[in-house]
């Protein structure tokens, strides 16, 4: 999927990287794009650009900006066919006042956004998770992400981007540090969700599970030679 990230700070930077590592094409944006280059260092299909570039690029747009800038940021999204994922919370932080709500108590950030972008597909997700928790999403137990969406066509996109998972491998270097995770690629990883890998006691086979989009699942095996094929050259 092509995803434009609007607001590449704690949340946008973290989630955008997870999607990039999962094989999606991601463009991070900033008012100063050059400072985002470290975010795409190890991504195969990562780019940086201005907010306008990211909106043009993405079929899906992640809104991860400070809430008080939202009106300005969504202006180019009016009447567009982009699918929007909104994780903003309607609060601002000040040293003096702490967390301060910036909209009335009897409405919500989601409701306010829907009123502004009446024709858009809008998914609300991730807003109750901290950036740190998302970074540790592989931990056990895995985190649960609730989402809501105003139109049926957004449901598949939301579930794909929340659940999307592939199998990666890390190799130990000579100095006993680990390489970055490397995607095992085809034929292990597909557009479905792969996980729970285990190696047979003789080291010859890797077994893994795959959950299809329709919720059905199965167990598969491949020769562990597939792991050697992605080992980086010395
Ligand atoms: N932090 C969390 O753990 C957490 C958890 C759940 C939800 N949230 C929500 O997520 C949203 C982002 O929080 P955050 O902690 O990621 O904030 P952050 O680290 O401050 O990042 C916000 C980004 O928004 C960009 N931005 C600011 N003004 C902008 C404008 N006028 N146009 C375009 N981009 C603009 C900034 O990018 P540039 O300065 O580079 O342009 C900045 O990198 C907030 O609504 C927050 O309530 C945060």
Image (cartoon, grey):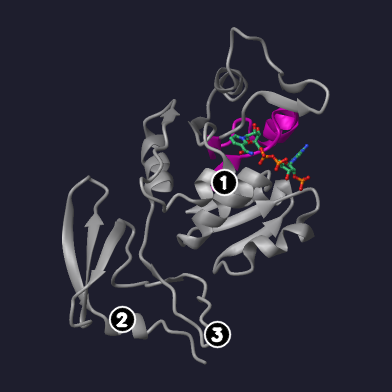
Q: Nearer the viewer, mark 2 or mark 3?
A: 3
Q: Is residue 55 visible?
A: no
Disc on res. 117: none
Query: For this view, does 60 lie left or right of residue 13?
Result: left
Disc on res. 175: 3
Q: Is disc 1's CB within 8 Å of ligand 1? A: yes
Tag 3 near tag 1, CB within 8 Å: no
Disc on res. 132: 1
Distance CA(mark 2)–CA(mark 3): 24 Å
Q: Residue at x 68, y 37 (%)?
A: 65
Query: For this view, does 135 lie left or right of residue 147?
Result: right
Q: Position of residue 36 (x, y in %)?
A: 72, 58
Q: Which residues are magenta?
A: 58-86
Residue named by callout 2: 226
Distance CA(mark 3)–CA(mark 1): 28 Å
Q: Position of residue 72 (x, y in %)?
A: 75, 31
**Residue projecting furthest to the right:** 96
**Residue projecting furthest to the bottom:** 234
């Amino acid at each position: 999927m092509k995803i434009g990230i609007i607001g590449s700070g704690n949340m946008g930077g973290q989630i955008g990287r997870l999607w990039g590592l999962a094989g999606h094409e991601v463009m991070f944006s900033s008012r100063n794009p050059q400072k985002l280059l470290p975010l795409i260092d190890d991504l195969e299909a990562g780019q940086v650009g201005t907010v306008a570039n990211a909106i043009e690029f993405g079929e899906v747009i992640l809104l991860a900006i400070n809430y008080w800038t939202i009106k300005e940021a969504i202006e180019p999204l009016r009447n567009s066919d982009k699918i929007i994922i909104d994780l903003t919370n309607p609060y601002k932080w000040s040293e003096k006042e702490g967390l301060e709500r910036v909209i009335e108590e009897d409405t919500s950030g989601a409701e306010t956004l829907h009123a502004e972008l009446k024709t858009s597909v809008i998914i609300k997700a991730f807003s109750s998770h901290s950036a740190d928790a998302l970074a540790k999403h592989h931990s056990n137990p895995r985190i649960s992400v609730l989402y809501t969406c105003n139109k049926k066509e957004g449901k598949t996109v939301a579930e794909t981007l929340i659940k999307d998972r592939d199998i990666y491998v890390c190799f130990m270097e000579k100095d006993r540090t680990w390489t970055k995770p490397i995607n095992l690629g085809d034929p292990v990883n597909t557009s479905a969700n792969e996980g729970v890998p285990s190696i047979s006691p003789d080291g010859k086979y890797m077994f893994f599970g795959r959950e299809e989009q329709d919720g059905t699942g199965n167990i598969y095996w491949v020769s562990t030679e597939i792991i050697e094929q992605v080992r980086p050259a010395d």
